[in-house]
Image (tube, rainbow, N blue to C red):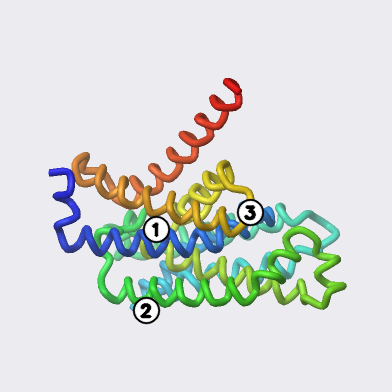
Amino acid sequence: MLLEPFTVTFVVRALIGGVLLAAICALVGAWVITRGMTFLGEAMSHGMLPGVAIASILGGNLVVGAAVSAFAMAVGVGALRHSREFGRDTSIGLLFVGMLSIGVIVVSHSRSFATDLTAFLFGDVLAIGRSDLLLLGAALALVAVVSALWYRPFLALTFDPRKAKTLGLRPGLANAVMLGLLTITMAVAFSVVGTLLAFGMLIAPTAAAMLVARRLPAVMGVAFLIGAAATVLGLWISWYAATAAGATIAAVAVLLFFALLGARRIMKGTL
């Protein structure tokens, strides 16, 4: 009875897709948190809406639309990050609200979104098909290769950008590559848990992993295990509780973070 949900084909596909996404988010989420790019990740997840809406109206690929929109957000932030008139967070906030507003305007003028908007915002993990799994697999392979090749520049950029420049590690290019990985992650996460919950899968497992691990490779490994566990538990709970699968997965990931945080504080209080 406990394993009954995972005997159904579409649940198995959802499980595989969720695990692949957990691996992608684990590799990228560690850099996002350590570099203080959390707000940017949240802005990207919400700012994908106009790209998704326009792609849907034109009959294009929604993931591509999400990627284009997220990339536009990254380019905008990069162009404004050195502004002397206002800080980086201000530029991210303005672009975030602007992109989200455009998305809402596009949605409000399209009748076709009457039934699809919920899926766009919160995902439909149980509708993942073979093509979606291939896309997630390709994204994981790309993220893994780039992360391995750029690990040293990413590490130097995260902890000492000036030293990275001195060592010839090209921090500017490394930052652009890192933003590219974040864009890819947000775009493929959209296909699993939607635009609004993609941020949760990126941040929650990694934040939880940082409570029990110190070195970045260990953080990435633990984050993957937590993300995979959230996928399994989320799908199992949604099956029996008849809740939205994507939202349940994201909620479980956040609950696991608070559970580990509570356990850590209890242990510190007793030692």
Mark 3: amino acid? Arg
Q: Upstream in the sequence, badge 3 or badge 1?
A: 1
Residue nearest the observer in this picture, 69 or 17: 17
Image depth: mark 3 or mark 1 in front:
3
Q: Residue 215 carries which label?
A: 3
Spatial distance from mark 3 to mark 2, Cα to Cα? 41 Å
Q: Which of marks 2 and 1 is in front?
A: 1
Q: Residue at the top extreme?
A: 270
Packing grade of label 2 (10 A; few <14, some 14-19, many >=20) is few
Q: Is residue 22 left or right of residue 71?
A: left
Residue 230, image x, y percentages = 37, 48
Check disc 3: other Cα within 10 Å, few if <14, some if 14-19, many if 20+.
few
Q: Is residue 184 left or right of residue 251?
A: right
Q: What residue type is labelled 2?
A: Gly
Looking at the rendered image, the quarter that the N terminus falls into is top left
Location of residue 56 in the rendering, given as x and y in whole percent from the top left corner: 36, 72
